Amino acid sequence: MGGSTANRKVVERAISGSGDLFAKTRARTLALVDGLSPEDLVVQSMEDASPAKWHLAHTSWFFEQFVLGQYVPGYRFFDERYLHLFNSYYVQAGTRFARPRRGLVTRPSASEVLDYRHAVDRAVSHLLASPPKDAAVEIARLVELGCHHEMQHQELLLTDLLHAFSFNPEMPAYRAPEPLAVTAGREPEITWQAFDGGLVEIGHDGKGFAFDNEGPRHKVWLEPFELADRLATNREWQDFIADGGYETQTLWLSDGWAVREQEGWTTPLYWFEKDGVWWSFGLRGAQPVDPDAPVTHISYYEAEAFARWAGARLPREAEWEHAASTVPVDGHFVEGGHFRPRPATGPGLTQMYGDVWQWTQSAYSPYPGFVPPEGAIGEYNGKFMVNQWVLRGASCATSRAHARATYRNFFHPHQRWQFSGLRLARDR
Ligand SMILES: [Fe+2]
């Protein structure tokens, strides 16, 4: 009796926790598109980016595909055509519409997509109110996954929108410009934080939510190393530019130099010069570059060249995680509403979480013992473990709920439309 009561309480807690998270997450997505026009919602500026309307629909598709369609007896899909239209990359879930053409889909309209969202909201809430007993824990787990999936899309929605807006000569601001943070002249020189290394453990231990790619927890050997106490700044990046960093082939990896040549990179993405001053375009419109704020919108190749120029290197992901687990999870996330990285404050190891994602020199590959889950949901992370690099730490567009020491973000080395920056490391 005691055991079954305890079990029931665990199930009830899981269901109510998922219900709260679901309501909060779905509302936040709508808050992020507040004030956008239907035209803003439909545009797609490149293959890597998706229209905001697609994000609104696809995050709803996820709950229909993996929760409602599986666990509601006789569930009638809102519109069968959406199963094809809003599937992203889940081969086992069925056919998919071509990703590069998402911006050509003017129907369903934005208001029809909002109706779709509301219908899915009602159906999920209804299911959570009276879940089938034998599947309640699994439903709670999948709804939680769907919420964390939606948070990832909230970040993409912002970075995709910024990319689209960057083509508009009027440089529209997503949110009203705010005054630049007051900075007291040059930021302090880097204070190197020393770590002994040795045999350490990294990876998620299974307590609380994590994506499958964060585990299993396992042992790693680290040689002694040092990390910069803060992120690399725009001022340092201006020094890199002034010193010919973008023109010095010997600083660059061969693949990186080829992309730099092909794309004609001479600055981070969204930088431009006006009357001899560097400006950048961001979610708060065009503003002079804040020299003390972390540099952002750089590729792995640029981060790597910068590190070589600075006489240092990028951290390995195990080094980063080992160091990050020694500091509290604190920083500038999307909830702060600044929508741009801010200068470092305080002594010790700062800015480990938030502001900008930090490129590491670690290839995105499976941890020892990693096995993706069975079925279509197993396609979430595992099949992308090639040709991409791990970024750590979260950004000013990331949900606070995604800031943890074990979180592994990943992108291709040439991509730079995310809030991606770097922290220097070196051997001791
Ligand atoms: Fe997705």
Image (tube, grey):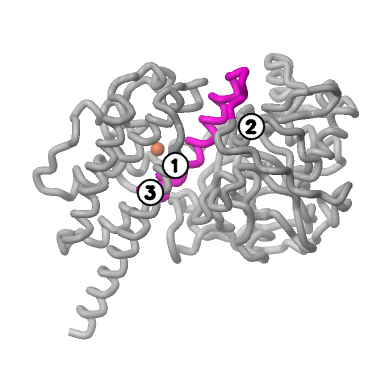
* Chain-order first, disc 2 or disc 3: 3
Circle 3 residues within 10 Å: few <14, some 14–19, many ≥20: few
Is residue 371 visible to us here? no
Q: Residue furthest bottom?
A: 2
* Residue found 56% across the figure and 25% down from its top: 165
Distance between mark 2 and mark 1 Cα atoms? 33 Å
Tag 3, which secondary structure?
Answer: helix
Frontmost of labels 3 and 1 is 3
| Residue type at tag 1 | Asn
Is residue 168 rendered magenta in the image?
A: yes
* Residue found 45% across the figure and 32% down from its top: 36
Label of residue 27 in the image:
3
Circle 1 residues within 10 Å: few <14, some 14–19, many ≥20: some
Residue 181 versus residue 271 in the image, above or below: below
Q: Give residue 421's position: percent from left, percent from top.
A: 69, 40
Residues 74 and 319: in front is 74
* Residue found 62% across the figure and 24% down from its top: 171
* Chain-order first, disc 3 or disc 1: 3
Q: Is residue 138 left or right of residue 343?
A: left
Q: Give residue 120's position: percent from left, percent from top.
A: 24, 43
Is residue 243 visible to us here? yes
| Residue type at tag 2 | Gly
CB atoms at circles 3 and 1 under 8 Å apart?
Answer: no
CB atoms at circles 2 and 1 under 8 Å apart?
Answer: no
Q: Which residue bears the numbered disc 1? A: 381
* Residue found 29% across the figure and 40% down from its top: 117
Q: Which residues make up the magenta segment?
A: 146-172
Q: Give residue 239's position: percent from left, percent from top.
A: 87, 34
Q: Is the magenta stretch mostly helix, strand or loop?
A: helix
Residue 243 versus residue 204 in the image, above or below: above
Residues 399 and 72: in front is 399
